[in-house]
Amino acid sequence: MHPHGITGLLIQVIKSWQVIFITLALIFYFALVFYVARTHHTPRRSGAGLTAKPAKAKKEKPSEVIPQASDDDLGVIEEE
C-alpha cells in the first residue's frame, strides 16, 4: 500500500460514527467516574508508613468542693 492510501484509510476510520460514538461514551463515562470519586470521598486510612498523632488529653479542672448537708450513719442530716 502507498502511504497516501494508509492515510486516507486512517482518516475514514477516525471519521466513522462508531469510533466517534465510543470516544464520546468513554469521555462521558470517565467524567462520571471522576465526579462520583470527587463527591463521595472517604477519609484516608493511615498507611503502613504513616503514624497517626495521638490525641491530646484534655486537662480536667478539679471540681470545687461545695459543702452540703450530708447523711451520717444514724440517718441524721448535719451540715458541715
Image: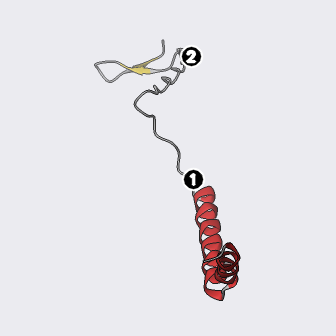
Point out which mark residue 63 bears: none
Local secondary structure at mark 2? loop
The colouring scheme, among rainbow, by chain, secondary structure or one colour, is: secondary structure
Give the residue displayed 53% in from the left and 50% down from the top: 42
The vertical placement of 64 against 12, above or below, is above
Which corner quadrant holds the N terminus?
bottom right
Residue 77 in the image: state x and y as whole percent.
Answer: 41, 21
Q: Callout 1, which amino acid?
A: His
Residue 56 in the image: state x and y as whole percent.
Answer: 53, 21
Relative horizontal placement of residue 1, taking residue 4 as reference (left or right): left
Residue furthest left in the image: 73
Kindly report the distance in space between the C-alpha atoms of the residues bearing marks 1 and 2: 39 Å
Category of crowding for the residue at label 2, using alpha-carbon neighbours closer than 10 angstroms: few (below 14), some (14–19), many (at least 20):
few
Relative horizontal placement of residue 49, taking residue 1 as reference (left or right): left
Q: Callout 2, which amino acid?
A: Lys
Q: How many marks?
A: 2
Local secondary structure at mark 1? loop
Point out which mark residue 41 bears: 1
The front one of 17 and 58 is 17
Category of crowding for the residue at label 1, using alpha-carbon neighbours closer than 10 angstroms: few (below 14), some (14–19), many (at least 20):
few
Viewer-side label of 1, 2: 1
Residue furthest top in the image: 80
Please identify the quarter of the rendering in which residue 32 is found.
bottom right
- Where does label 2 land, which residue? 61
The vertical placement of 59 against 3, above or below, is above
Please identify the quarter of the rendering in which residue 60 is found.
top right
The vertical placement of 48 against 40, above or below, is above
Give the residue displayed 70% in from the left and 80% down from the top: 8
Along the polypeptide, which appears first: circle 1 or circle 2?
A: 1
